Image: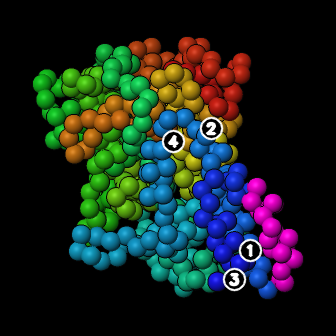
Amino acid sequence: MKPFYLSALFLACLQYSGSAHALLNTHPLSGQINNFPRHIDPIIQPVKKTIQSTKDQTQAQAQQPLDTASDKLVDPLLQLPKQLPIINTQGKTVLMDVEVEHGWRAVEREWLVMLEDKDLPSVQALGVEILEQTHYAQLGMSLLRFKVTAELDSLAALQQHLPAAMSARIDRNHIYASQNKKTRDNLPTNLSRNAACDIPVALGIIDTAINLSHPAFTSGNQPSTIISHDFLVENMTATNLPTLTAHGTAIAGLLVGKSDELQPLLPKATLYSASVFFARNDYAQGATIINLVSALDWLAGQKLSVINMSLAGPDNQILAKVIAKILASGHVIVAAAGNEGPAAPPLFPAAYPGVIAVTAVDSEHKIYRWANQGNYISFAALGVSVTTARSAGGVGNESGTSIAAPVVSALIACELTQTKTSPAQAIAHLVSKAVDLGKQGRDPVFGYGLL
C-alpha cells in the first residue's frame, strides 16, 4: 500500500481529535497531502471530516451532564426514514408516514380543508380522491380529507387551482409526536410529590391509550375515574393498528396513579382520555391532524376546563383554527413545549397564542437539556427523571416536557375549580406564585417561572 494511503488510514482511525489535528499539521506527509492533485480530494476530505467530527464529539461529551449517555442511546431510535409504512396487525400498510416540507411529517399526499358549502365543487374539480367529509358538532366546523396526485402535493400547487379564500383553510394531514424520553441517568428521582389539590376536578388528555389494568389505577380505593375514547379505532376502523399504551399510561400515572411509589397530582379527578397515537416503531408514535381534531371535538363536549396535550409538531392552519375555537369556548389548553433542543424553532400547539406552553426542569431546577426555548414558554415544572407508571407494570423514570405539562394542567384545573374564576384570572394567579428561575420576569427558557 502507498505511504499516503497508510497515513490517511492512520489519521481516520485515531480516537482523539487533538492527536489527529496535530498529526495532520506536523506529519512529514502533510505537505504531500495538501499538494496532491484534485482528483484525490474525495479521499482526503472524508479524513478531514472524520477528524473534525471526532474533535467536536469529544468536546461536546466533555461538557455534558450525567444523563447524556442515556439520551443518546434513545435519540437515534427516534429518527425516522423519509418514508415509513405504518403496518397493521395483519402485516398490511394502512398509511405512509413521510417527511414533507421543513422536515415535518405527514400522511403521504393527504390534505385537509375546513369546508364551506361552496367549496366542495372546487375540490372535486381537481380530480383528487375524496377520503372523508366529517362535521364536528362541538367545534361547529366540517373537514374534508382528500388525497392528491404527486403534481398537486404542495400548498403552492393547490393554491393555484383553488379559490383564494380557501388558502387559509387548507393544510396537510400532519403527524405529531409525544414529547418524553425514558431515562437511565443518575439524577435524583421524584419519588414523592404533593397533590395539586384534593378535590374533585375534571381534566382531559390527548395521548395514547392507557393501560387501565395497571395496579396504579386499580389497587385500593381509587376515587379517580378514567373515561376513555379511542379515536385511532373510530377514525381508522378497518386498519387494525396495534393499541399503544406507554405514553398515555405515564401521563395518567402522574395525574391519577396511586401506589406506594406514586402520589397523584389529582387524587379525586375524572380524567377524560382521548387516544390518538399509532406506532411508528418501538420508541416513537404519531398522531394525525384528523385524529387530533376528533379528540378536541370530543373533549370540548365534556364537562372539563383543562386539556393536556403532551405532544408537538408543526404549525398547521387547521389545528390553529381548532385550537382558537377551543380557547374561545372557555377551555384552557396546556401543551408540552417540545424536546427538540434550545436552538429548535417553536413547536405547536404549544406556540399558538393562548396555549400554556410548559418546559421541564430537573430536581435542582436546571432546565432540561432537550427542551425547546422561545418567547412562547409559559411555565416550567418538574419533568426530568420523574417516577410514574409504566404500561408493562410497575413504575419507572420518564423525562421530557411531556412529563412537565401535566403538573401545570393539574394546577390550573385546581385553580379554576376552587376559585370559580376565569381562565385568565386563574393563570394570572399562578404567574404570581411561580418561582422566577431565569432573567427577571418572563424569559424564553423558564417562562414566568417554576410551578
Label 1 to label 4: alpha-carbon separation: 32 Å
Q: Residues within 10 Å of mark 1 (few under 14, many from 20)?
A: some
Image position, residue 135 (x, y; %): 42, 59
Q: Nearer the viewer, residue 116 or 409?
A: 409
Most common SS among magenta residues: helix
Against 78, residue 70 (above or below) is above
Residue at the (56%, 56%) spot, across then down: 318
The picture quadrant where one finds residue 386 is top left
Q: Is residue 356 above or below residue 413?
A: below
Kind of residue at badge 1:
Ile
- Residue mark closest to the camera, 3 vs 1: 3
- Residue 44 - label: 1
Name which residue type carries label 4.
Answer: Thr
Task: Look at the picture and state if 245 lies above or below 445.
Answer: below
Which is nearer the N-term, disc 1 or disc 4? 1
Q: Total marks drawn? A: 4
Label 1 vs 2, first from the N-terminus: 1
Which residue matches tag 2? Answer: 63
Q: CA distance from mark 2 to mark 3?
A: 39 Å
Report if the CB atoms under discs 1 and 2 are less than 8 Å apart.
no
Which residue matches tag 4? 68
Q: Which residues are magenta?
A: 22-38
Residue 232 falls within the magenta-colored stretch: no
The spot of residue 17 in percent (x, y) is 67, 54
